[in-house]
Image: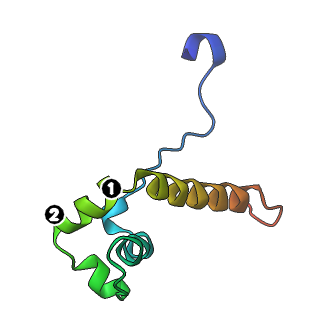
Amino acid sequence: MFRQTGKPTFFLSLSSMEYSCPELLQYLEKLHTNNICTAKQALSMEDSHKAFLVQNDPISCDRHFNHKVRKFLNFLKQKKFVW
């Protein structure tokens, strides 16, 4: 690929990190168990409970990640953002 198109000028690797995203965990907890929790409580949940929440709602996780990626790309496209 490098020989055909040349060296890449920008490379971006993103990860959704569902288990360490407090706003996503708070949303999933409210949605599935109807419990309201703080960001600190969301991050201190047991890993098995986090896995349960994420595995039972992959659509919400994907939409949350997509929203964050769009916000990041819009930030990069701003004219006042300087490389």
Q: Which of marks 2 and 1 is in front?
A: 1
Residue 25 visible to the viewer: yes
**Measured from the top left, where is residue 26 in percent x and y?**
39, 77
Q: What secondary structure is marked by label 1?
A: loop
| In the image: residue 4, left or right of residue 41 | right
* Identity of the residue drawn at 28% across and 77% down: 43
| In the image: residue 39, left or right of residue 50 | right
Q: Determine which quarter of the picture holds residue 47.
A: bottom left
* Identity of the residue drawn at 36% across and 89% down: 38
Question: Quarter of the image containing the N terminus?
Answer: top right
Q: Eyeballing the image, is 7 above or below 4? A: below
Q: Eyeballing the image, is 79 above or below 46? A: above
Q: Name the residue under label 2.
A: 48
**Measured from the top left, where is residue 42 in percent x and y?**
30, 79
Q: Mark 1 points at which residue?
A: 56
- Which of the labelled discs sits on residue 28, or is there none? none
* Separation of residues labelled 2 and 1 (CA atoms): 12 Å
**Measured from the top left, where is residue 80 in percent x and y?**
81, 67
Marks 2/1 in contact by CB < 8 Å: the verdict is no
Residue type of the residue flagged with mark 2 = Ser
Question: Quarter of the image containing the C terminus?
Answer: bottom right
Q: Eyeballing the image, is 10 above or below 49? A: above
Residue 83 visible to the viewer: no
